[in-house]
Amino acid sequence: MKRFFTIILLFALLSSLLLTSACSSGEESEVHVFFYNYSDTYITSVRSALATVMNASGASFQNYDGNNNQTTQTEQIRTAITKGARVLLVNLVNTGSADAATTVVNEAKNAGVPVVFFNREVPDSVVNSYDKCAFVGTDSEEAGHLQGQMIGDYVKENFQTLDLNGDGEISYILFKGEEGNNEAIHRTRYAVEDANNILTSAGMKPLRFYDKSNANKYLVDPNGAWSAAAANQYMTTALASYNEANNNMIELVICNNDGMAEGAITALNTAGYNNGSGKSIPVFGVDATDAAKNLIASNKMTGTIKQDAEGMARALDKLAANALAGRSLLDGVDEFTVDEGVAKIRIPYEKYLG
Amino acid sequence: MEGKFLLEMQNIGKYFPGVRALDGVTLRVRPGSVHALMGENGAGKSTLMKCLFGIYHKDTGTILLDGDEVSFKNPTEALQFGVAMVHQELNQALSRSVMDNIWLGRYPTFGGLFVSEKKMLADTRAIFDELGVSVDPYKIMSEMSVSDRQMVEIAKAVSYNARVIVFDEPTSSLTEKEVAHLFKIIRALRDRGCAIIYISHKMEEILEISDEVTVMRDGRWIATEPASELSMEKIIRLMVGRDLESRFPQRKGKPGEVILSVKNLSGRYNHLENVSFELRRGEILGLSGLAGAGRSELIEAIFGLTARRGGSIELFSRIIENKTPREAIKNGFALVTEERRATGIFGVLSIKENATISSLKGALRLGLFVNDGTLRRNTDWAINEMKIKTASQKTQIRTLSGGNQQKVIFGRWLLTQPDILLLDEPTRGIDVGAKFEIYRLMAELADEGRSIIIVSSEMPELFGVCDRILVMSNGRLAGEVDPKTSSQEEVMELSARFL
Amino acid sequence: MKLFANNMQRWREFRELDKRDRGRAVTELIINNSLYILLFLAIIFIGIRSPRFLSIPSLINILSLSAAGLPIALGIAGCIILTGTDLSAGRIVGLTACIAASLLQSTDYGNKMFPGLATLPIWLVLLIVLAVSGVIGLINGFCTAKFKLHPFIVTLATQLIVYGVLLLYLMIGNNNGQAISGLSPEFNDFINGSILNIAGTPIPNFVWYALAITLIMWVVWNKTRFGKNMFAVGSNSEAANVSGVNVTATIMLVFTLAGVLYGVTGFIEAARISSNSAATGVNYELDAIAACVIGGVSFVGGIGKIRGVILGVVLLRLIFVGLTFLSIDANLQYIIKGLIILVACAIDMRKYLVKK
């Protein structure tokens, strides 16, 4: 019997191998795309947009999941280069310092392969160190500024309704996705700063972090994965001691991305808030994922910042096509905003309030 | 002895790649009788039983139960036909209660969902009353003695209305008193009309309990005879195929001066109380007593396995501590433990690793690297000296028979050049031939001037090999007997002294 | 020669079997070695579909990937032989990588963690790192041996503690939770540099270090008293105690040695990946455990060989590289990896179950 099951297992392994290799595209892929983490919702939307654009333009490509692990990603990139990749599109895992990016650029430079970083920002010096290197992303500060404006405007309009305990201050909670990431740092900073500017100039008191003893004035995903689970856990814990019964309810939720906003909303739902009607606390995110759009449409979430996944996909496709054709990377990219002095394309953000 | 047979196994054959485990073996058992099945380890008794219970698939032959041919797929199916086995090593759910174990897999339920504890209790009590067993049905198995656990196993067989019950070495870990109780129950089962197959190595028991005896050797049937016509010598001759000159070897030397003196030894976490004795050079000292009398505890305390509360150990007129086994080994002690599988062998490791683990220090080069050549030579020495039957040094020890495993462990200890060997039931579960080898080895070692303390529950064994026998009772020393002048009854009396 | 004689012996035994048993023996042989057969077929298959797979740069890539995974797997293998495991391995790698990186930042790096720190000699940093990881391993071993806790529990706890320490460490000095980078070129060269090129492709230095460590571990496992004792304790710790083995010391030493090996891994990773954050090393232990069990280091205890660990590590890396070369979807790669681990362990377990 044991022998029988072992054979069954072997068979399962063999057939899955055959099946997958049958599914794999026969020809060698030219464009190799490295995503930092398949489980990130926004990155997944970029992945599907990129697949649509690339399939339309006929480029052959292969996707990789870095699983939020720089080691895995670096090894994948090395392997892809030995496999004969002609273009590398890299959504770097570790953006806290220049070294991971430098390592990748050096690998690419040695093999003479163009490399385009996207979404997660790399330093200018790295991009400038190699003529076949570029970056496609957003202005990391812009999302923070836009979110700050959106929050400031919203709070100014609805101050009386939002101030649940009537103390003349709005208390907020803020979820940071990860330490040492530029996007996270800028969003965390400007979302509050810009909102406060609007409020103080209108003669109102600035936002106050709900927990006086927290000097950071933010809560960060301990795994650095911008995850809904972490936000949910923090929110549930916070609501246990900060609620209307104690007259210190959290009156505003700011999240660095929509995934964490979803997690926070689920926690609020359990506590009896943000169920579409009835009591509601404003929740703001970034990315405008489909889930967030749905939540906004059903009145459970207030607003988000749209990161243009299609726009980013189009830019990446264009750069990849340039590289394959042997042109300079930034050839004919007039439709996009390019930074001065460095090959960085900026895809603009938009406010999304439903 | 007339009448038809309840169980007939005819011409059973079983082949493994390269080995004929069974070759045309026939076993016929009458209802209302006890049929002993004998043979050395490896004679094929277990294989035959495994064929009966469907654990092995027999290659030839037929099995008739009450005249109908049967072929059980597994022990569960056999049980449903009323064929049960009380195992040598009890396979029980130790953390569950007596009742749970008896009704495991077929709990009486109401509503098909909820277990009816009431019915379970009543049924259990009924069986226990019938068998004269006094065990609390709620008791947890792991808190019970081996003997009581065996009773539970028998009750379980009875609860299936078993007509054929196989006992596989049932007395190997029972005391004399418990054996008597077991025999009472076996006789009760026999009188109900059950056919009992009784597998054992112990001649005295076989002659006492059985009506008929079948002897096997090397996978073949040798003889089936009424027990009344057999003697111990004849059985041994049938089993071994030759005359064993004597059951116990001759001793040449005489005990010399006192080398070890234990004074007022008490255990910290057990009931060992104020034990004092002396051991002489070249002496074989027996430790007798009932199960739980503290015999194992005593030698474990000497070896540093269990903590002492008080008392002293003097070796060569020097006080020693023996706080850990390592220290004891350094002081020249060696301990062959009772539970070979649990505390003796390293099952998945080779004979070489098993034999040399305690003497690695002597095989070091540069004080750091183990010299493999020395290890191999030492292992070869052990294999030759102990007459271990094995294909190579690399054989995993778990594949050897119990007797050969025990010889490897003896080899392990002799490689440490011990002055004092502590042996805890060294011949348990070992066949006659291997037993004799162990006795011979003990005699040789004693003649060489090494001293031996042996714990055993087999009284004939103690009387056969020992120079002196100490009897323990309830953690204390009850007395000393001289095997040449005393009787087994005297030992029994002393065993009960502090109860 | 010995191998040859053994095989001849087996062949003779095989010849003696009858037809039915022969068929059975052949099937057994195929099942027991199916993973290697499969691996061999896969290499040929991938090599045909994508010839670059067998090119020198690709082979050296596989070699260096395997070398990077070896020390940690060798450390964990010891714990598995004791019927334990070690969940703290990855976090220890992370901590040691960050310590090594922080002490070996180049002096002119702007965001240096300890700005006043002069350039330390590499050997000194290596010693510091090994001491730190050794102590953590010792704590694991101490709790396992003295409190009789299962290593799963102990290392589950220390894993969290080490992570906390790592997060605190990253907040020290100038660093403020950032990833540590700007490594000194000497350090980078010590790990990633090369003293040997094959057909123009350099073999990174850390491959040699991994090789040396593997050799040392082979000697430790097979030629020292400690190694013999380790297998005995893993096989039957009670019997080992009775036989005079210092079980407590053996367990503590196995975990300490494992810790030291994680330290080596961390030291190499610091320069190999060259960006060291709180996420460095996370889940490394899972790959290492997988490599061990694929290579036949059994959770039964007392069973395992150095060559098995090497094979497991190489096999895992081959799967990783091979699937990439076959352009197999990343989602499916996880499924295949899982299946391979299952099959490997099922086949391995068959060898130790009593045949009925």
Image (cartoon, coloured by chain):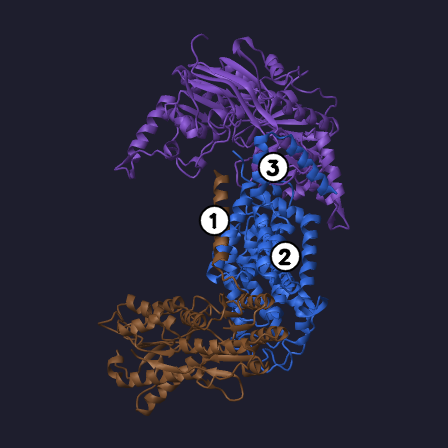
Q: Regarding mark 1 in the picture, which secondary structure is present there?
A: helix
Specify the colour of chain B.
purple
Residue under label 3: B344
Please name which of the two marks, 1 or 3, marks the residue nearer to the observer. 1
Residue under label 1: A12
Mark 3 is on which residue type? Gly
Mark 2 is on which residue type? Leu
- Asked whether the beta carbons under mark 1 and mark 3 sit within 8 Å of each other, the answer is no
Residue at image x 29%, y 39%? Answer: B114
Q: Which chain is brown?
A: A
Left/right placement of residue A173 relative to residue B429 reads left
Residue under label 2: C257
Assess disc 3: are there few (<14), some (14-19) or many (≥20) residues with their C-alpha within 10 Å of its C-alpha: many
For the residue pair A247 and B238, the one nearer the viewer reads as B238
For the residue pair C147 and B427, the one nearer the viewer reads as B427
What is the C-alpha distance between the residues marked 2 and 1?
38 Å
Q: Regarding mark 2 in the picture, which secondary structure is present there?
A: helix
For the residue pair B420 and C90, the one nearer the viewer reads as C90
Quarter of the image for the C terminus of chain A: give it.
bottom left
Q: Regarding mark 3 in the picture, which secondary structure is present there?
A: helix
Residue at image x 67%, y 29%? Answer: B389
Q: Give the answer, above or below, for where A203 lies relative to B128.
A: below
What is the C-alpha distance between the residues marked 1 and 3?
42 Å
For the residue pair B212 and B391, the one nearer the viewer reads as B391
Mark 1 is on which residue type? Ala
Image coordinates of residue C289 in percent, x first then y, are 55, 54
Which chain does tag 1 point to?
A
Q: Which chain is blue?
A: C
Please name which of the two marks, 2 or 1, marks the residue nearer to the observer. 1
Which residue sits furthest left? A278
Which chain does tag 3 point to?
B
